[in-house]
Image (cartoon, rainbow, N blue to C red):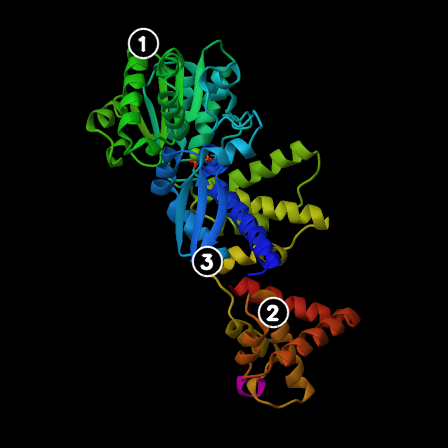
C-alpha cells in the first residue's frame, strides 16, 4: 500500500467512524453518546476487523454488551469489508489527545464532587419540555395527570413509574415534572439511569462512593429516565436499590421512566421490581390520529413563535404525516421538521407532492412504495393507450411521448437506477432513459400546458399510492 492510499484510508476510516457516532447519537440520545461513544476512537481496519480504542476495560465491556451490534451494523453500511470489531484499551492514547478539561466522561479524578458536575443532574433538564406544550390525548392522559399531580403534591404517588415504548413522550413528561419543580426550592436530580450507573461506577473507580451516595441520597426528588438500562448490572442495581430505599424512606419523591412495565424487566432483582411497582405504575400508549395531528399542529405553532415566521405547511400535509408515521412521535416530529426546513430553504409552500418527494427515502422503506409498473399503468390510462403499444418498440409520437413521460416520472418518483428503469421498458438502454428525461424536461420548460400535464399525472400517481 502506498503512503497516499494509507492516508486516504485513515481519512475514510475517520469519516466513517464519525458518521457512525452521529447515528448512534441519534438513536441512543445525547447522554449515552457522551458517556460511551463520543470519546471512542477508530484506530484501523485490518483483516476485516475494525479496531476501536477505549480508555478502560469497563467502557469496553459496556460497549460490547450494549452497542457493539449496532456499531457493526452501521459501520458495515458504510464499509462492507468490516466483519468484526475489536477493542484496544489504551489510556495514554487519550492523555495525548484530549487535554480539554470539559471532557468529564472519561476523565479520571473526582469529577463527581466538582461544583460543576454536582449539578450535572439538574443541568440536564431540557427547559423546552414542559406540561404546557405536552398535548394530552387518551393514550397519555393517565401518565400526564399523574405527573402533574406529583409535581403539585410531592409523595402523592411514590414512586411514580411511567412506561411506554420509544418516542412516546416519557422523557418529555419527566422533564416537565423537573421544570415545574425547579421553580420551587426543592433539590432535584434528573438524569438517565445510564448516567446514574456511569457516575456510580466512576465513583467506585475513584474510591469516592461516599460522595456519590451523599449526592443522591440527599435530594428531595430523584427523576430517573430509562431505567431499563440498569438491568443486568449487579453492583449498580444494588446501589440503585439502596439509594431508592433510602429516598423513599426519607419520603423523597422518586419518578422513573422505563420502556416496559416493572414486571417485564428482565435481569432485575425481584425485590427491586416489587419496590418499583409500590407506588403508581402508568403507561403511555401509542397516540391515535387525533392526538398525532394535534401534536403536529402545536409543533407548527411553536416553530412560528420561535422563529417569528409563518410555517408554510398546510393541513393536507399534516394529515398525511399523521397517517404515515404512527409508531413514534419523535419520528413523526422529525419528519415535520424536515418539511419545514425544506420549505424555508426553498421559500415556498410545499404541495403534498413536494412533501412526498422530500420524504421519498423514508416512504420507500414503508409499504407504500411507488413502482415503475404503477407509473406505467397510470400513464397508459391517462393517454388512453394499450399497454402493449406502450411497451412495444413503436416510435410514433403519440406513443413515444407518454413513454418518455413515464420514464421521467420513474426517475423522479422512485429510487430506481437508470438501467433498472430501462429494463422495465422492455429492455431499453439507460441512454434511452437519459434522453427521455432530457426531452421531457425541455418540453416542460417550453410548454406550460405540457408541464401541467406531467404535474397532473405525477399528482395522480402520488394520490393513488
Ligand atoms: P420517549 O422518552 O418516550 O422516547 P420523548 O419524550 O423523547 O419520548 O418524546 C419524543 C418527542 O416527541 C419529543 O420531542 C417530545 O417533545 C415529543 N412528544 C411526545 N409526546 C408528546 C406530546 N404528547 N405532546 C407534545 N410533544 C410530544
Ligand atoms: Mg426518553
Q: Earlier in the sequence, mark 3 or mark 2?
A: 3
For residue 250, the mark is 1
Seen from the viewer's position, the closer of residues 360 and 86 is 86
Residue 238: horizontal and vertical position, in percent? Answer: 26, 23
Is residue 387 covered in magenta? yes
Number of other residues with Cα within 10 Å of mark 3, as a class: few under 14, some 14 to 19, many 20 or more = few
Upstream in sequence: badge 3 or badge 1: 1
Image quadrant assignment for residue 35: top left
Q: Main SS type for the magenta part?
A: helix
Q: Which mark is residue 153?
A: none
Which residue is disc 2 drawn over? 411
Start and end of the magenta stretch?
386-390
Of tags 3 and 1, which is closer to the observer? 1
The reply to whether residue 290 is in sight is no
- The image shows residue 117, relative to residue 90, as above or below, that is above
Image position of 101 with respect to 167: above or below: above
Q: Secondary structure at mark 3?
A: loop
Quickly name the residue at label 3: 366
Placement of 362 over or under 26, stated as above or below: below
Earlier along the polypeptide chain: callout 1 or callout 2? 1
Percent coordinates x, y for residue 279 in the rendering:
28, 21
Comparing 395 with 218, the one in front is 218
Q: Tag 1's secondary structure?
A: loop
Amino acid at each position: 500500500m502506498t503512503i497516499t492510499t494509507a492516508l486516504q484510508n485513515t481519512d475514510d476510516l475517520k469519516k466513517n467512524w464519525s458518521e457512525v457516532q452521529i447515528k448512534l447519537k441519534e438513536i441512543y440520545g445525547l447522554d449515552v453518546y457522551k458517556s460511551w461513544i463520543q470519546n471512542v476512537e477508530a484506530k484501523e481496519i485490518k483483516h476485516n476487523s475494525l479496531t476501536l480504542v477505549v480508555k478502560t476495560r469497563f467502557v469496553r465491556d459496556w460497549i460490547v454488551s450494549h452497542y457493539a451490534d449496532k456499531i457493526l451494523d452501521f459501520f458495515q453500511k458504510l464499509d462492507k469489508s468490516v466483519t468484526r470489531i475489536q477493542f484496544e484499551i489504551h489510556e495514554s492514547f487519550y492523555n495525548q489527545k484530549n487535554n480539554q478539561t470539559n471532557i468529564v466522561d472519561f476523565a479520571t479524578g473526582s469529577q463527581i464532587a466538582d461544583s460543576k458536575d454536582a449539578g450535572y443532574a439538574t443541568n440536564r433538564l431540557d427547559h423546552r419540555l414542559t406540561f404546557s406544550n405536552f398535548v394530552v390525548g387518551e393514550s397519555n392522559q393517565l401518565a400526564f395527570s399523574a405527573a402533574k399531580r406529583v409535581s403539585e403534591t410531592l409523595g402523592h404517588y411514590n414512586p411514580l413509574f411511567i412506561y411506554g415504548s420509544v418516542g412516546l413522550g416519557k422523557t418529555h413528561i419527566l422533564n416537565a415534572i423537573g421544570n415545574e419543580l425547579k421553580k420551587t426550592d426543592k433539590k432535584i436530580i434528573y438524569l438517565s439511569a445510564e448516567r446514574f450507573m456511569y457516575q456510580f461506577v466512576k465513583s467506585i473507580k475513584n474510591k469516592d462512593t461516599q460522595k456519590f451516595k451523599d449526592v443522591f441520597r440527599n435530594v428531595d426528588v430523584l427523576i430517573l429516565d430509562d431505567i431499563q438500562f440498569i438491568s443486568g448490572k449487579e453492583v449498580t442495581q444494588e446501589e440503585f436499590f439502596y439509594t431508592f430505599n433510602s429516598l423513599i424512606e426519607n419520603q423523597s419523591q422518586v419518578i422513573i421512566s422505563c420502556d416496559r412495565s416493572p414486571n417485564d424487566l428482565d435481569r432485575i432483582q425481584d425485590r427491586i421490581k416489587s419496590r418499583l411497582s409500590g407506588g403508581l405504575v402508568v403507561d403511555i400508549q401509542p397516540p391515535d390520529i387525533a392526538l398525532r395531528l394535534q401534536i403536529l399542529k402545536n409543533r407548527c405553532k411553536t416553530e412560528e413563535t420561535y422563529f417569528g415566521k409563518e410555517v408554510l405547511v398546510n393541513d393536507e400535509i399534516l394529515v398525511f404525516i399523521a397517517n404515515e408515521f404512527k409508531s413514534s412521535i419523535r419520528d413523526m416530529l422529525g419528519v415535520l421538521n424536515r418539511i419545514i426546513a425544506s420549505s424555508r430553504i426553498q421559500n415556498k409552500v410545499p404541495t403534498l407532492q413536494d412533501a412526498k418527494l422530500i420524504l421519498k427515502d423514508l416512504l420507500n422503506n414503508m409499504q407504500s412504495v411507488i413502482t415503475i409498473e404503477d407509473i406505467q399503468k397510470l400513464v397508459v390510462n391517462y393517454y388512453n393507450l394499450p399497454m402493449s403499444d406502450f411497451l412495444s418498440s413503436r416510435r410514433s409520437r403519440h406513443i413515444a411521448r407518454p413513454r418518455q413521460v413515464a420514464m421521467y416520472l420513474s426517475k423522479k418518483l422512485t429510487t430506481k437506477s437508470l438501467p433498472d428503469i430501462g429494463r422495465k421498458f422492455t429492455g431499453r438502454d439507460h441512454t434511452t432513459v437519459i434522453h427521455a428525461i432530457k426531452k421531457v424536461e425541455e418540453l416542460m420548460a417550453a410548454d406550460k400546458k405540457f408541464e401541467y400535464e406531467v404535474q397532473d399525472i405525477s399528482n395522480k400517481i402520488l394520490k393513488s399510492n
